[in-house]
Every structure is written in structure tokens, then in C-alpha cells.
Image (tube, rainbow, N blue to C red):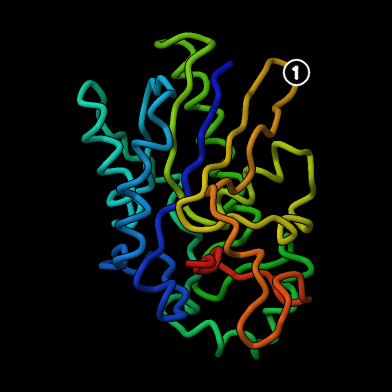
Amino acid sequence: MPTLILVRHGRSTANTAGVLAGRAPGVALDEHGAAQSAALPARLARVPLAALVSSPLQRCRETMAPLLAARPGLTLHIEDRISECDYGDWSGRKLAELTDEPLMEAVQQHPSSVAFPGGESMRAMQARAVDAVRDWNARVEQTLGAEATYAMCSHGDIIKSLVADALGMHLDLFQRISVEPCSLTVIRYTRLRPYLVRLGDTGDFASLVPRDDGGSPAADRDAAIGGGAGAG
């Protein structure tokens, strides 16, 4: 079965503004995110990509644009099922405000129980994303061969839920996973089990450096809903 490279979109204007973008239109890459995406072709230069797939949201399509330009024989396939979680009424709100919402404790500790007001449940989010990957695995294998590798650009919570599925982890544990903007996560699928080959690989270890305020990168804190802005 194929190997899947999951690309989280580059840093966005919502990431730097501390806003939960969700599916709000017009959320683009910021300057740093554009530089991250521009580096993707070099990072993946040795990988013979068979297909490119993207969430329909602008920040993902912008992230994939340099890779698409570097691979003129490929087209970008849009897959609605790997779009961002529908956070409903939480979309567009400041992350700092959301920490005081009673639902946030469940988002952190028991996400399989969470349905966002006016949006979707986290269980439904994972189910649609897993279905999409399974369908694309079959499609790529049938048309391009079992050894093919393809790239799919999506969002933090989507990628974390796919990693949890690949590892056989319950969704309630997926907040233990971290994927920074423009990181690469690689899952090799086989007939009997998936293998997690890379997780959140950016090639940048800045997030491990102690912060200016004396805090530690390993200090206890909540998982960043939506994936966070990374260390850039």
C-alpha cells in the first residue's frame, strides 16, 4: 500500500494572531508561512511524489503551490474530507478566550466526547479524515502502484487524529501529539498495519530552546487546539 506524507499548512495569519481560524475564509499564510512552503520542494526533492492532495482551505492550497510548481506533471486534488475541523461557534475567536470555556477541559482530556456548538464532533472529524485517507490509499495504489508515495496537506487536528488512528490510539489520547506548521508526518500503510515513519518533522529544533521568559518548552500546558503557531 502507498506511503502518505502529511503536510501541515504553513504558519497562517490566524496562527500569529492567536485566533482559531476553523473554516473561516480568507485565512492566508503569513510571511513566515510563505517561506516555509517555499522550502517544501527542496525538502522533498528526492521523493518521487505520485500525487498531491489538499484541504480546500486557502492556507493549505497556498502551502502546496510551490510544490505543485516544482512538479509540473502533477495536479492538485482537492479533498473536502481533510478540511479543518468545523469548530462552529468557536471559529474566529481568540484562543486565549477559549481557555475559559467549560468545554475546553473536555477538548483537552476527553475529546471523543466533544461536539463543538454549531459545528461537528471530534469523532466525526477523525472518521471523515480516516475515510479520506483509506480511499486515497486505494486510489493511488490502483492507479500508481503499491509502492507509490503521495502528499496530502491538511490541518493540525486532522493530522493528529490520523496519527492516532495509525498508532491504534484512542482519540482521547490524540492531544499528546504535536505537529507544527509545515511539518511533515509520514505514514507507511501496509496490508496488516500502518507504520509511523516521521512525526511533525520540520528540521528545526527551535521549539526545544528555553523561552526568553525562563520557561521550559516541556512545561505543562494545554494542547494548542487547531495545532498552534509553532516556534517560528
Q: How crowded is the residue under tag 1: few (<14 C-alpha within 10 Å), some, or many (20+)?
A: few
In percent of width and height, residue 94 lies at: 48, 85
**Residue 191 left/right relative to 86:** right
In percent of width and height, residue 102 lies at: 70, 86
State the image quarter where residue 1 is shown: top right
Q: Nearer the viewer, residue 207 or 124?
A: 207
**Residue 29 left/right relative to 138:** left
Residue in view at x 68 percent, y 79 percent: 104
Residue in view at x 65 percent, y 91 percent: 100
Task: Look at the picture and state if 86 lies above or below 210.
Answer: above
Q: Nearer the viewer, residue 167 or 79?
A: 167
Query: Residue at label 1?
Result: 192
Residue in view at x 25 percent, y 67 percent: 26
State the image quarter where residue 127 is shown: top right
In percent of width and height, residue 125 lies at: 57, 53
Number of numbered markers: 1
Task: Look at the picture and state if 90 lies above or below 193.
Answer: below
Residue in view at x 30 percent, y 57 percent: 34
Task: Look at the picture and state if 40 lies above or below 214.
Answer: above
Question: Of the residues shown, which amino acid type is indicated by label 1?
Answer: Leu
**Residue 61 left/right relative to 1:** left
Local secondary structure at mark 1: loop
Q: Nearer the viewer, residue 120 or 195?
A: 195
In percent of width and height, residue 98 lies at: 58, 85
